[in-house]
Amino acid sequence: MPLIRVESSEDLRLAPYSGMTDAQLRDGPDSEQGLFIGESRKVIERALAANVRLRSLFLEEKWLDQTTGLIERLLASDPELPVLVATRAQFHKVTGYEVTRGALAAFERPALPRVEDLLVGARRVAVLEDVVNYTNIGATFRSAAALGIDAVLVTPSCHDPLYRRAARVSMGTVFQVPWTRIGQVRDWAPEGVPLLRNLGFKTAALALADDALPLQDERLRACERLALVLGTEGDGLAASTIAQCDYTVKIPMDHDVDSLNVAAASAVAFWELRTKWRG
């Protein structure tokens, strides 16, 4: 295989891997939408299956045996693709961290669709408000893919689902579940909730409140189109968001536990209110 053995950490082809922040990659001048880094074979393969454009591959030489099949397929379709291979010391010098799941890949960031276009035909949608923990974002996307969520909307202050750790935790499902951003400012609900309502969705805010409906309430199950709104770690949803939504919903719990982490709560809610697999 025509592999490129790294000779210098200053090689310009290594720039996307050399400690650039997510924002720097996103605002990079050599791609219209910017770049993002995918880590692990599963993430890379799911991005490729979603027709995300690959710019280069970078891996430590110890992963060559496990990655040979993928590399051969990539080079068969694009013989000019840079496949950069480094020693452990070189790899660590470039990236500054240990990669435990194989190769890294630089991808061109896809353009995000309009909310109206994304939700055509959708019945169950998740809205992530200000979620800033990448592990929670990735885990929520994985649950969404597995449990019948048709699309995910992320608010302006929610962190990026394509960030390396989020995509890795999701097992690449950020490329399987359609998603986009909703709203232009942090207080997205005055604009976003009416938009969802105009598209035929009822909105359900998952929040602790004395008058909240239990998750299994038949009114929720009966909604033809339902958007589940989940809040950030710790503070939960903004009061203004809860006030805008059609329903406030809670997950009934035992042993005086008041709430679950957002990723766990999303999995419970997605399963309970799924439309698929019902008679």
Image: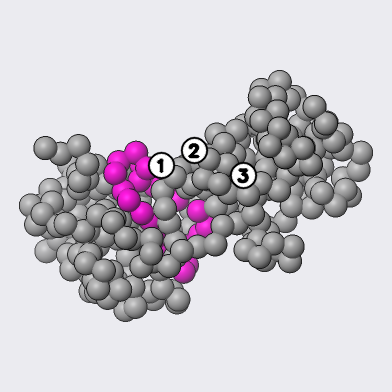
**What secondary structure is found at the residue carrying circle 1?**
helix
Residue 170 drawn in magenta: no
> Could you tell me residue 31's position as x and y percent?
69, 62
Left or right: residue 20 compared with residue 189 = right
The span shown in magenta is 135-161
Residue 140 drawn in magenta: yes
Q: In which quarter of the image is residue 243?
A: bottom left
Q: How crowded is mark 2: few (under 14 residues within 10 Å), some or many (20 or more)?
A: many
- For the C terminus, the image quarter is top left
Residue topped by disc 3: 38
- For the N terminus, the image quarter is top right
Residue shown at the point (34%, 38%) measured from the top left: 146
Residue topped by disc 1: 142
How many numbered marks appear? Answer: 3
**What secondary structure is found at the residue carrying circle 3?**
strand
Q: How far apart are marks 2 and 3 (CA)?
A: 11 Å
> Could you tell me residue 148's position as x and y percent?
29, 44
Residue topped by disc 2: 171
Q: What residue type is labelled 1?
A: Arg
Q: Return the mark for residue 203.
A: none
Q: Distance between the residues labelled 2 and 1?
A: 7 Å
Q: How crowded is mark 1: few (under 14 residues within 10 Å), some or many (20 or more)?
A: many
> Could you tell me residue 197's position as x and y percent?
23, 71
Seen from the viewer's position, the closer of residues 41 and 71 is 71
Q: Are marks 2 and 1 in contact (CB under 8 Å)?
A: yes
Q: Which amino acid does label 2 sit on?
A: Met
Q: How far apart are marks 1 and 3 (CA)?
A: 16 Å
Q: Residues within 10 Å of mark 3 (few under 14, many from 20)?
A: many
Mark toward the start of the polypeptide (1 vs 3): 3
Establish if 65 lies above or below 187. Answer: above
Seen from the viewer's position, the closer of residues 215 and 114 is 114
Q: Which amino acid does label 3 sit on?
A: Gly
